[in-house]
């Protein structure tokens, strides 16, 4: 049976390709959030000392934020709100990555390299979130 013509004024549904990038970004954030909650100890050491309170609380709070933002990015209805939050989160965690790179100066070369590689990685992550924001549908799915 042939497909029926679209209703007048109806927008075409998003293609599977256009949904891949937001879902991958959302999955990345959700995966990071789960890691913060189930294996927080290594992440506690990245919390800058200038932040008040217990590092574990910051680790858990950032994990919850990553879960919520990741879900918002993955869902078409909340994507336009979730993507700027994702970009902001990537900027907000940059000081933790700087601290990690500084703290790992005495580690073996592969670990130092990984810690340093995290620093410029924030730029494409922010750009990815903003690109997904620009391509997100403006209407409610």
Image (tube, helix red, strand yellow):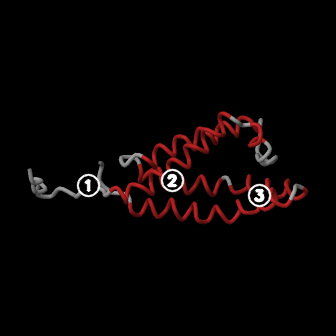
Query: Which residue occupies 50% across, 56% down?
Result: 84
Q: Which mark is residue 115?
A: 3
| Residue 52: % across, % down | 77, 41
Along the viewing direction, whichever of 141 and 50 lies nearer the viewer? 141
| Residue 60: % across, % down | 66, 36
Residue neighbourhood size for the residue with mark 2, other residues' Cα within 10 Å, grouped as few (<14), some (14–19), many (≥20): many
Is tag 1's residue or tag 2's residue first in the polypeptide sequence?
1
Query: Which residue occupies 31% across, 58% down?
Result: 15
SS label for mark 3: helix
SS label for mark 1: loop
Residue neighbourhood size for the residue with mark 1, other residues' Cα within 10 Å, grouped as few (<14), some (14–19), many (≥20): few
**Which residue is denoted by mark 2 in the rendering?**
25
**Left or right of 111 on screen, residue 23:** left
Along the viewing direction, whichever of 50 and 74 lies nearer the viewer? 74
Task: Give the vertical position of 69 relative to 131 (above or below).
Answer: above
Query: Which residue occupies 65% across, 35% down?
Result: 37
**Which residue is denoted by mark 1 in the rendering?**
13
**Left or right of 137 on screen, residue 121:** right
């Amino acid at each position: 049976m042939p497909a029926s013509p679209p209703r007048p004024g109806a927008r075409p549904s998003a293609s599977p390709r256009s949904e891949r990038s937001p879902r991958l970004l959302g999955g990345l954030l959700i995966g990071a959030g789960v890691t913060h909650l189930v294996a927080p100890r290594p992440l506690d050491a990245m919390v800058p000392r200038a932040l008040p309170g217990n590092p574990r609380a910051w680790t858990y709070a950032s994990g919850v934020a990553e879960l919520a933002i990741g879900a918002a990015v993955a869902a078409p209805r909340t994507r336009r709100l979730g993507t700027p939050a994702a970009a902001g989160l990537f900027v907000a965690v940059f000081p933790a990555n700087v601290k990690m790179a500084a703290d790992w100066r005495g580690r073996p070369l592969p670990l130092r390299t990984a810690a340093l590689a995290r620093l410029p990685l924030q730029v494409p992550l922010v750009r990815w979130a903003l690109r997904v924001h620009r391509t997100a549908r403006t209407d409610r799915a």
